[in-house]
Image: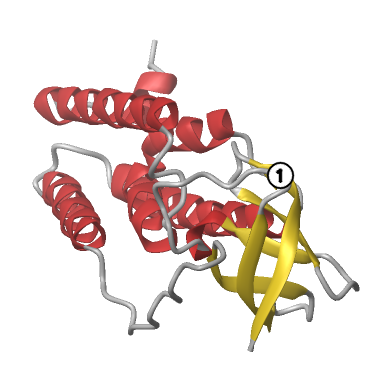
C-alpha cells in the first residue's frame, strides 16, 4: 500500500529525515538509500510517496520512497557489489602477505594477530555506526574510524564500507581513510624489510 506525506525534517549530511503522513499520526523515518531518484536530493516540504514498514524495534520506516507521479522502483534481489568483492580479495591478499611474512620470520606474530583483531573490531564499529545513523543514535566519530584504520584495522573497515554501504560517498572521509591505509602499509613494509618487531621497537633493550 502506498502512503503519502510531507518531508518535515531532513539532514542532508547524514542522509535521513522524517515524513509526516498526510493522514496524520506518527512521523516516519526515511533514509536516502530508499529514494528511487538518486540524482535528486530531498528537501524539507517536499511531498513524497512511500511504502510503510517497521524496523527491528517496531518504529515506522519508509521504503520505496519516490516523488509524486514517479513510477515505483521495482524490487529486485540484492546483487553483490563488485566493490565488495574487491575489498574482500584485496584485504585477503594483504592479510595473507602479513601472515606469510610472519611465517618467514620477517614479522612478529603479534602483527597479524593485531591486524585481525583490529579489523574485526572496526568492521563491527562500522556496522554499529550505520545502524546508529539510521536510528538517530550515538555516532562514532570519523577520526576514530580512521585512527583504527591507521592502526591496522583498515581491511575490516574497507570490507564494512562496501558491505554496509557506509561512508563510501563522502570524498573527504575516503581521502583520509586511504591516506591511513597507505601509511599503515608503508610502515608494515618497512617492518618486513628490516625484520623489525613493533613490540621490541616500543621497548628497546639497553
User: Quick one: which residue is furthest to the top in this view?
Assistant: 206
Mark 1 surroundings: few (<14), some (14-19) or many (≥20) residues within 10 A: some
- As drawn, is 104 to the left or to the right of 191? left
Nearer to us in this view, 46 or 165: 46
| SS for dot 1 | loop
What x and y, as percent, mark residue 166? 46, 51
Q: Residue at x 45, y 76 (%)?
A: 72
Front-lying residue, 82 or 192: 82
Q: Quadrant of residue 168?
A: top left
Measuring from the top left, give residue 27's x and y in whole percent: 83, 65
Apparent side of residue 24 relative to residue 166 in the rendered image (left or right): right
Q: Residue furthest front?
A: 69
Q: Is residue 203 above or below residue 95?
A: above
Q: Relative to 203, say whether 164 is above or below.
A: below
Residue to which mark 1 is pinned: 44
Q: Nearer the viewer, residue 32 or 204?
A: 32
Classify the position of the C terminus by image quarter: top left
**22 vs 147: above or below:** below
- Whether residue 91 sits left or right of residue 49 in the image: it is left
Q: Tell me the quarter of the image containing the N terminus.
A: bottom right
178 or 6: nearer the eye? 6
Coordinates of residue 151 in the picture (x, y in percent): 42, 33
Q: Residue at x 43, y 73 (%)?
A: 71
Q: Residue at x 67, y 51 (%)?
A: 46
How many marks the image carries: the answer is 1
**Horizontal and vertical percent for residue 150?**
40, 30
Amino acid at each position: 500500500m502506498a502512503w503519502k506525506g510531507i518531508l518535515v525534517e531532513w539532514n542532508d549530511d547524514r542522509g535521513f529525515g522524517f515524513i509526516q503522513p498526510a493522514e496524520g499520526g506518527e512521523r516516519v523515518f526515511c533514509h536516502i538509500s530508499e529514494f528511487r531518484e538518486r540524482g535528486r536530493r530531498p528537501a524539507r516540504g517536499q511531498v513524497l510517496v512511500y511504502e510503510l514498514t517497521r524496523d527491528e524495534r517496531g518504529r515506522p520506516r519508509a521504503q520505496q520512497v519516490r516523488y509524486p507521479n514517479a513510477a515505483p522502483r521495482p524490487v529486485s534481489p540484492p546483487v553483490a557489489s563488485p566493490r565488495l568483492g574487491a575489498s574482500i580479495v584485496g584485504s585477503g591478499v594483504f592479510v595473507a602477505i602479513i601472515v606469510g611474512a610472519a611465517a618467514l620470520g620477517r614479522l612478529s606474530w603479534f602483527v597479524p594477530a593485531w591486524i585481525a583483531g583490529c579489523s574485526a573490531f572496526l568492521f563491527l564499529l562500522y556496522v554499529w555506526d550505520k545502524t546508529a545513523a539510521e536510528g538517530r543514535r550515538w555516532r562514532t566519530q570519523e577520526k576514530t574510524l580512521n585512527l583504527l584504520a591507521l592502526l591496522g584495522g583498515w581491511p575490516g573497515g574497507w570490507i564494512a564500507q562496501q558491505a554496509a554501504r557506509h561512508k563510501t560517498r563522502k570524498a573527504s572521509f575516503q581521502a583520509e581513510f586511504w591516506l591511513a591505509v597507505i601509511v599503515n602499509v608503508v610502515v608494515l613494509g618497512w617492518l618486513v624489510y628490516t625484520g623489525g618487531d613493533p613490540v621490541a621497537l616500543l621497548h628497546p633493550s639497553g
